[in-house]
Amino acid sequence: MSKLLPTLLCAAVLAAAQPLSATGAAPPDRSALVAFGAVAPEIKGLVLNGERGMKLTGFRGRVVVVDFWATWCGPCLQAMPELDRLRTELADLGWGDRFEVVGVSVDSDIPRARQFLERVGIGYPVFGDPLSIVMKQWGPWKLPATFLLDADGRVQMIWLGYADYFGADIKAKALEQLRRLDAPSAPP
């Protein structure tokens, strides 16, 4: 036991000094996350669902929820239908021209992401980010990663992960931003 104690102490000190996770990868750089109040980085390029040539700045003047997801992420699969329902609900309340949800698939397998979108029937625009360029610019280290942008494209709220209050919380925060704009237009 007396020989084992120094060995365990040495191993503990070395382990504490190593910036590695259990998988051997470096821990996430949490300082890379886009800052609250910052103008959100542009998203453009590969469109999986929506108009060809669209880009995030094309939604300026609207409150926008940007959601990073992947087909292999279970919590993402729970969040996406909630976001789609929120989009529909806010449109029914007259906010359809002032609110949008935009998805960003981080799947490297684009055909799989397209098949998934066709199968689940998500109605909001979705970009593909197979090389994680957008993901690196925005900096989330956990999925789903959901950002609320005001009408000027500034980050107002960030959710990393999914919980049972996810949809209600996003709705409340989105409505706060929408009410700052003006009254909703009449529903169709």
Image (spheres, helix red, strand yellow):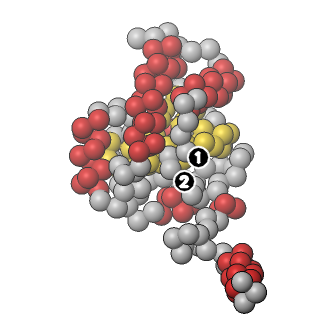
Q: Reply above or below: 170 against 55.
A: above
Q: Reply above or below: 179 against 132.
A: above
Q: Residue at x 46, y 31 (%)?
A: 83
Q: Residue at x 29, y 41 (%)?
A: 117
Q: Quadrant of the N terminus?
A: bottom right
User: Tag 1's secondary structure?
Assistant: strand
Q: Is residue 162 left or right of residue 46?
A: right
Q: How many marks?
A: 2
Q: Is residue 167 left or right of residue 128?
A: right
Residue underneath mark 1: 160
Tell me if mark 1 has few (under 14), some (14-19) or many (20+) residues whose alpha carbon lies within 10 angstroms of its own: some
Q: Residue at x 41, y 11 (%)?
A: 188
CA distance for labels 2 and 1: 6 Å
Q: Nearer the viewer, residue 143 or 16?
A: 16
Q: Label 1 near label 2: C-beta < 8 Å?
A: yes
Q: Nearer the viewer, residue 36 or 179?
A: 36
Residue kind at label 1, given as amino acid type: Leu
Which circle marks residue 142 in the picture? Answer: 2
Can the viewer see residue 152 in this picture? no
Can the viewer see residue 73 in this picture? yes
Residue kind at label 2, given as amino acid type: Lys
Q: Horizontal and vertical percent for residue 153?
A: 61, 42
Q: Is residue 20 left or right of residue 8?
A: left
User: Tag 2's secondary structure?
Assistant: loop
Q: Horizontal and vertical percent for residue 114?
A: 27, 48
- Extreme front residue here? 1
Q: Residue at x 62, y 34 (%)?
A: 151
